[in-house]
Image: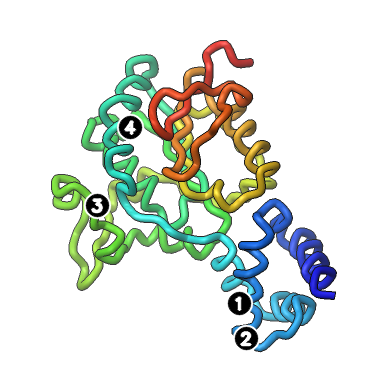
Amino acid sequence: MGDQDYELFIEQIKKRTKIDLGQYKETQMKRRLTTLRQKHGFQTFASYMDALVRDQAFMDEFLDRMTINVSEFWRNPNRWEMLEKRFLPEMFADNSRISIWSAACSTGDEPYTTAMILDKMGKLDRTTITATDLDHNVLSKAQGGLYHERSVRDVPSVYRERYFTADGDAYAVDERIKRAIRFKQHNLLYDPFGGPYDLIICRNVMIYFTEDAKHGLYQRFSNALKPGGILFVGSTEQIFTPQQYQFETVETFFYRKMNNAT
Protein backbone atom coordinates (compact mmCIF):
# COMPACT_ATOMS: atom_id res chain seq x y z
CA MET A 1 0.00 0.00 0.00
CA GLY A 2 2.80 2.37 0.99
CA ASP A 3 4.69 1.94 -2.27
CA GLN A 4 1.53 2.35 -4.37
CA ASP A 5 0.66 5.47 -2.40
CA TYR A 6 4.06 7.03 -3.15
CA GLU A 7 4.09 5.87 -6.79
CA LEU A 8 0.70 7.49 -7.41
CA PHE A 9 1.98 10.65 -5.72
CA ILE A 10 4.94 10.70 -8.14
CA GLU A 11 2.57 10.38 -11.12
CA GLN A 12 0.28 13.16 -9.90
CA ILE A 13 3.17 15.53 -9.14
CA LYS A 14 4.60 14.97 -12.61
CA LYS A 15 1.26 15.71 -14.26
CA ARG A 16 0.65 18.84 -12.21
CA THR A 17 4.15 20.34 -11.99
CA LYS A 18 6.26 18.53 -14.63
CA ILE A 19 8.61 17.56 -11.79
CA ASP A 20 9.66 13.92 -12.15
CA LEU A 21 10.39 12.66 -8.63
CA GLY A 22 11.21 9.29 -10.19
CA GLN A 23 14.49 10.81 -11.42
CA TYR A 24 15.61 11.54 -7.84
CA LYS A 25 17.16 8.93 -5.54
CA GLU A 26 14.05 7.31 -4.06
CA THR A 27 15.27 6.56 -0.53
CA GLN A 28 16.39 10.14 0.11
CA MET A 29 13.44 11.85 -1.54
CA LYS A 30 10.77 9.57 -0.08
CA ARG A 31 12.22 10.00 3.43
CA ARG A 32 12.35 13.78 3.04
CA LEU A 33 8.76 14.03 1.78
CA THR A 34 7.42 11.54 4.33
CA THR A 35 8.81 13.72 7.10
CA LEU A 36 7.22 16.77 5.51
CA ARG A 37 3.72 15.30 5.13
CA GLN A 38 3.78 13.78 8.62
CA LYS A 39 4.72 17.17 10.07
CA HIS A 40 1.32 18.41 8.87
CA GLY A 41 -0.54 15.33 10.05
CA PHE A 42 -1.18 13.67 6.66
CA GLN A 43 -1.22 9.88 6.98
CA THR A 44 -0.83 9.15 3.27
CA PHE A 45 0.69 10.74 0.19
CA ALA A 46 -2.80 10.76 -1.34
CA SER A 47 -4.13 13.06 1.41
CA TYR A 48 -0.97 15.17 1.17
CA MET A 49 -1.48 15.53 -2.59
CA ASP A 50 -5.01 16.82 -1.98
CA ALA A 51 -3.56 19.47 0.33
CA LEU A 52 -0.95 20.50 -2.24
CA VAL A 53 -3.68 21.03 -4.82
CA ARG A 54 -5.84 23.10 -2.44
CA ASP A 55 -3.22 25.21 -0.71
CA GLN A 56 -0.40 27.05 -2.53
CA ALA A 57 1.49 27.45 0.76
CA PHE A 58 1.79 23.66 1.02
CA MET A 59 2.94 23.49 -2.62
CA ASP A 60 5.58 26.18 -2.05
CA GLU A 61 6.87 24.32 1.00
CA PHE A 62 6.96 21.06 -0.98
CA LEU A 63 9.01 22.69 -3.75
CA ASP A 64 11.40 24.21 -1.26
CA ARG A 65 11.94 20.88 0.52
CA MET A 66 12.56 18.82 -2.60
CA THR A 67 14.99 21.25 -4.22
CA ILE A 68 17.49 21.19 -1.34
CA ASN A 69 18.58 24.82 -1.31
CA VAL A 70 22.08 24.76 0.13
CA SER A 71 24.49 27.33 -1.22
CA GLU A 72 27.04 29.93 -0.20
CA PHE A 73 29.45 32.38 -1.80
CA TRP A 74 32.86 31.04 -2.85
CA ARG A 75 32.00 27.50 -1.76
CA ASN A 76 35.30 25.58 -2.14
CA PRO A 77 37.30 28.81 -2.59
CA ASN A 78 40.28 27.24 -4.37
CA ARG A 79 37.96 26.08 -7.17
CA TRP A 80 36.68 29.63 -7.70
CA GLU A 81 40.26 30.85 -7.75
CA MET A 82 40.94 28.35 -10.53
CA LEU A 83 37.97 29.72 -12.46
CA GLU A 84 39.22 33.28 -11.99
CA LYS A 85 42.91 32.68 -12.73
CA ARG A 86 42.71 30.09 -15.49
CA PHE A 87 39.42 29.36 -17.17
CA LEU A 88 37.79 32.78 -17.50
CA PRO A 89 40.98 34.34 -18.95
CA GLU A 90 41.18 31.46 -21.43
CA MET A 91 37.59 32.10 -22.52
CA PHE A 92 38.18 35.81 -23.10
CA ALA A 93 41.38 35.08 -25.01
CA ASP A 94 39.22 33.37 -27.65
CA ASN A 95 35.97 35.39 -27.41
CA SER A 96 34.97 39.05 -27.26
CA ARG A 97 31.88 38.03 -25.26
CA ILE A 98 31.02 34.93 -23.27
CA SER A 99 27.76 33.34 -22.13
CA ILE A 100 27.37 31.68 -18.72
CA TRP A 101 24.58 29.57 -17.26
CA SER A 102 24.35 28.97 -13.50
CA ALA A 103 21.99 25.99 -13.33
CA ALA A 104 20.08 25.09 -10.15
CA CYS A 105 21.41 28.36 -8.71
CA SER A 106 19.36 28.23 -5.48
CA THR A 107 19.56 31.58 -3.66
CA GLY A 108 21.97 33.07 -6.19
CA ASP A 109 25.27 32.76 -4.32
CA GLU A 110 27.06 31.11 -7.27
CA PRO A 111 25.97 33.44 -10.09
CA TYR A 112 26.71 36.45 -7.88
CA THR A 113 30.15 35.02 -7.08
CA THR A 114 30.75 34.64 -10.81
CA ALA A 115 29.58 38.18 -11.57
CA MET A 116 31.82 39.66 -8.88
CA ILE A 117 34.86 37.83 -10.22
CA LEU A 118 34.08 39.03 -13.75
CA ASP A 119 33.58 42.59 -12.60
CA LYS A 120 36.90 42.61 -10.77
CA MET A 121 38.49 41.31 -13.99
CA GLY A 122 36.84 44.17 -15.91
CA LYS A 123 34.88 41.68 -18.03
CA LEU A 124 31.35 41.81 -16.63
CA ASP A 125 30.08 44.04 -19.43
CA ARG A 126 31.28 41.43 -21.91
CA THR A 127 29.36 38.60 -20.27
CA THR A 128 25.78 37.30 -20.32
CA ILE A 129 24.85 35.44 -17.12
CA THR A 130 21.65 33.42 -16.83
CA ALA A 131 20.78 31.85 -13.47
CA THR A 132 17.96 29.33 -13.09
CA ASP A 133 16.26 27.23 -10.45
CA LEU A 134 13.13 25.13 -10.13
CA ASP A 135 11.93 26.92 -6.98
CA HIS A 136 10.46 30.38 -7.57
CA ASN A 137 10.76 31.19 -3.86
CA VAL A 138 14.55 30.86 -3.82
CA LEU A 139 14.71 32.83 -7.07
CA SER A 140 12.89 35.67 -5.31
CA LYS A 141 15.48 35.53 -2.54
CA ALA A 142 18.24 35.55 -5.11
CA GLN A 143 16.83 38.61 -6.84
CA GLY A 144 16.59 40.33 -3.45
CA GLY A 145 20.33 39.85 -2.95
CA LEU A 146 20.30 39.87 0.87
CA TYR A 147 22.36 37.26 2.73
CA HIS A 148 23.19 36.19 6.28
CA GLU A 149 26.72 36.14 7.62
CA ARG A 150 27.09 32.37 7.15
CA SER A 151 26.61 32.73 3.39
CA VAL A 152 29.43 35.23 2.97
CA ARG A 153 31.97 33.70 5.38
CA ASP A 154 34.27 32.51 2.56
CA VAL A 155 34.08 35.72 0.52
CA PRO A 156 37.61 37.18 0.17
CA SER A 157 37.89 40.49 1.99
CA VAL A 158 38.58 42.45 -1.20
CA TYR A 159 35.27 41.23 -2.63
CA ARG A 160 33.29 41.68 0.56
CA GLU A 161 34.41 45.30 0.88
CA ARG A 162 33.73 46.06 -2.78
CA TYR A 163 30.46 44.27 -3.48
CA PHE A 164 28.56 43.94 -0.19
CA THR A 165 26.96 46.48 2.12
CA ALA A 166 26.12 45.62 5.73
CA ASP A 167 22.35 45.75 6.31
CA GLY A 168 21.65 45.03 9.97
CA ASP A 169 22.82 41.46 10.57
CA ALA A 170 22.81 40.72 6.82
CA TYR A 171 24.78 41.70 3.72
CA ALA A 172 23.30 43.23 0.56
CA VAL A 173 24.79 42.59 -2.88
CA ASP A 174 25.74 45.65 -4.92
CA GLU A 175 22.87 46.70 -7.22
CA ARG A 176 25.08 46.74 -10.32
CA ILE A 177 26.02 43.10 -9.73
CA LYS A 178 22.36 42.20 -9.25
CA ARG A 179 21.41 43.84 -12.55
CA ALA A 180 24.02 41.78 -14.40
CA ILE A 181 22.18 38.50 -13.86
CA ARG A 182 19.00 37.27 -15.49
CA PHE A 183 17.14 34.96 -13.10
CA LYS A 184 14.39 32.64 -14.35
CA GLN A 185 12.57 29.48 -13.34
CA HIS A 186 13.77 26.29 -15.03
CA ASN A 187 13.26 22.54 -14.59
CA LEU A 188 16.53 20.70 -15.31
CA LEU A 189 14.72 17.44 -16.01
CA TYR A 190 12.12 18.88 -18.37
CA ASP A 191 12.91 22.30 -19.89
CA PRO A 192 15.22 23.02 -22.87
CA PHE A 193 18.78 23.96 -21.95
CA GLY A 194 19.42 26.66 -24.53
CA GLY A 195 22.97 27.73 -25.30
CA PRO A 196 25.53 27.41 -26.61
CA TYR A 197 27.35 28.45 -23.45
CA ASP A 198 31.03 29.05 -22.73
CA LEU A 199 30.57 28.04 -19.07
CA ILE A 200 27.91 26.05 -17.22
CA ILE A 201 28.01 26.01 -13.43
CA CYS A 202 25.97 23.25 -11.79
CA ARG A 203 27.25 22.37 -8.33
CA ASN A 204 26.05 20.11 -5.53
CA VAL A 205 22.81 19.18 -7.28
CA MET A 206 23.55 16.04 -9.31
CA ILE A 207 24.16 13.98 -6.16
CA TYR A 208 20.39 13.89 -5.58
CA PHE A 209 19.55 12.32 -8.95
CA THR A 210 19.52 8.69 -10.06
CA GLU A 211 22.35 7.43 -12.26
CA ASP A 212 20.06 7.41 -15.31
CA ALA A 213 19.05 11.01 -14.66
CA LYS A 214 22.69 12.05 -14.22
CA HIS A 215 23.63 10.40 -17.49
CA GLY A 216 20.96 12.31 -19.38
CA LEU A 217 21.82 15.60 -17.71
CA TYR A 218 25.56 15.36 -18.33
CA GLN A 219 24.90 14.68 -22.00
CA ARG A 220 22.53 17.63 -22.22
CA PHE A 221 25.07 19.88 -20.50
CA SER A 222 27.61 18.79 -23.07
CA ASN A 223 25.20 19.51 -25.91
CA ALA A 224 24.53 22.98 -24.49
CA LEU A 225 28.23 23.92 -24.34
CA LYS A 226 30.32 25.33 -27.14
CA PRO A 227 33.26 23.13 -28.18
CA GLY A 228 35.94 23.99 -25.66
CA GLY A 229 33.34 25.16 -23.13
CA ILE A 230 33.61 24.32 -19.44
CA LEU A 231 31.28 22.47 -17.04
CA PHE A 232 32.01 23.37 -13.39
CA VAL A 233 30.56 20.84 -10.91
CA GLY A 234 30.52 20.37 -7.14
CA SER A 235 33.08 18.77 -4.87
CA THR A 236 31.13 15.49 -4.58
CA GLU A 237 30.20 15.17 -8.25
CA GLN A 238 33.22 13.80 -10.08
CA ILE A 239 32.40 12.44 -13.55
CA PHE A 240 34.24 9.10 -13.73
CA THR A 241 33.89 8.54 -17.50
CA PRO A 242 33.78 12.06 -18.97
CA GLN A 243 34.64 10.87 -22.48
CA GLN A 244 31.19 9.35 -22.94
CA TYR A 245 29.79 12.90 -22.74
CA GLN A 246 32.49 14.37 -25.01
CA PHE A 247 34.24 15.86 -21.96
CA GLU A 248 37.84 15.80 -20.85
CA THR A 249 38.96 16.48 -17.28
CA VAL A 250 41.05 19.66 -17.24
CA GLU A 251 41.18 20.32 -13.48
CA THR A 252 39.45 18.91 -10.41
CA PHE A 253 35.69 19.46 -10.92
CA PHE A 254 36.20 21.20 -14.28
CA TYR A 255 35.36 19.42 -17.53
CA ARG A 256 35.99 20.77 -21.01
CA LYS A 257 33.87 19.85 -23.99
CA MET A 258 36.18 18.35 -26.58
CA ASN A 259 36.76 20.57 -29.60
CA ASN A 260 36.09 17.67 -31.95
CA ALA A 261 32.72 16.92 -30.29
CA THR A 262 29.73 17.11 -32.60
Q: Residue at x 20, y 72 (%)?
A: 168
Residue placed furthest toward the top: 260
Label 3, secondary structure: give it: loop
**Residue 80 percent across, percent down from the top left:** 31, 38
| Sequence order check, earlier mark of 3 and 2 | 2
Relative vertical location of residue 106 with respect to residue 43 in this rendering, above or below: above
Q: Which residue is mark 1?
A: 36
Q: Which residue is mark 2?
A: 40
| Sequence order check, earlier mark of 4 and 3 | 4
Asked whether disc 4 touches disc 3, contact meaning CB atoms under 8 Å apart, the reply is no
Disc 2 marks a residue whose amino acid type is His
Q: Which residue is mark 4?
A: 83
Q: CA distance from mark 3 to mark 1?
A: 31 Å
| Sequence order check, earlier mark of 4 and 1 | 1
Q: Quadrant of the C terminus?
A: top right
Q: CA distance from mark 3 to mark 2?
A: 36 Å
Q: Which residue is mark 3?
A: 154
